[in-house]
Amino acid sequence: MSDEKTAIVTGASRGLGLALATGLAAAGWRLVVDARDGEALATAMDRLPGEHAVLPGDITDPAHRAALVDAAHRLGGPDLLVNNAGILGPSPQPGLGGYPLPALREVYEVNVFAPLALTQAALPALRGRAGAVVNVTSDAAVEPYPGWGGYGSAKAAVEQVSRVLAAEEPALRVWWVDPGDLRTRMHQEAFPGEDISDRPLPDTVVPAFLKLLSERPESGRVKL
């Protein structure tokens, strides 16, 4: 399916990012991956087949973003950018009336500005390779769940950025992908002290993700 293509996957040390990276590696993609926890990232990538560039770092750091794109070029790409890295914000999540604004700025910096900046850096190569951008979103972007105003509004911004990017870059595929509620550490942080074992594991959405890449439908919102 991949024909030795290269994907950048952010936030790949655990959860959804690791599941998507694992699926891509199994399908023959070369990977450029990052996460803030370098030890966890290295351990996770050691188990995957194929050729990978493993770059621990902070996605809000311009030098780190440039290094990700440079690594993709060295592997022959990039053909795909998966903007998965993100943060929830305070846990338990506060209502908007008392949401600490410095924390909200950080949520937007990580979840909105950093993915857009990385996309900007990768765009010239993606255009030349008829590539694709996948921005991970959430149903909290479109539903008014109490307590989800910070994270949800950031993901709503990601969705609108994705829509406009799709309109501006017709040569690319831009998908904003909602994986649903998954059994991840971030989801547990959203529900501290609660049992979330009924949520599906992240790897359950990988087949739908690979099908998306294979079939390449028009740009748009995708529910995995």
Image: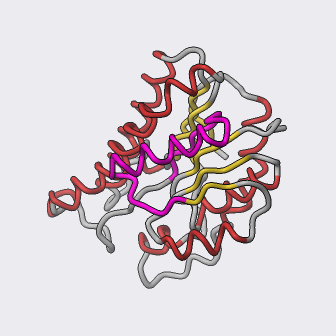
Image quadrant holding the N terminus, namely top right
Residue 56 counted in the magenta span: yes
Residue 124: x percent and y percent? 50, 24
Number of marks in picture:
0
Q: What residue sits 51% from the left and 41% below the top?
A: 70
Q: Quadrant of residue 47?
A: bottom right
121 left or right of 75? left
| Spot occupied by residue 142 in the image (x, y as percentages of width and height) | 43, 42
Residue 8 image offset from top left, x and y in percent: 58, 46
Q: How is the image coloured?
A: secondary structure
In the figure, is residue 108 to the left or right of 39? left
Magenta part of the chain: 55-84
In the foreground, 50 or 101: 50
Identify which residue is drawn at 60% across, 20% down. 128
Residue 175: x and y in percent read 58, 33
Residue at 61%, 36% (x, y): give it.
78
**Relative to 91, is 217 above or below?**
above
Comparing 142 with 222, the one in front is 222
In which quarter of the view is residue 220 placed? Answer: top right
Magenta span has 132? Answer: no
Give above or below for 2 relative to 111.
above
148 and 37: which is toward the camera? 37
Q: Reply above or below: 98 against 216.
A: below
Between residues 172 and 197, which one lies in front from this camera angle? 172
Q: Find the residue positioned furthest to the front.
A: 74
Horizontally, residue 112 falls left or right of residue 198, namely left
In the picture, measured across the screen, residue 5 lies left or right of residue 154, that is right
Q: Residue at x 30, y 55 (%)?
A: 107
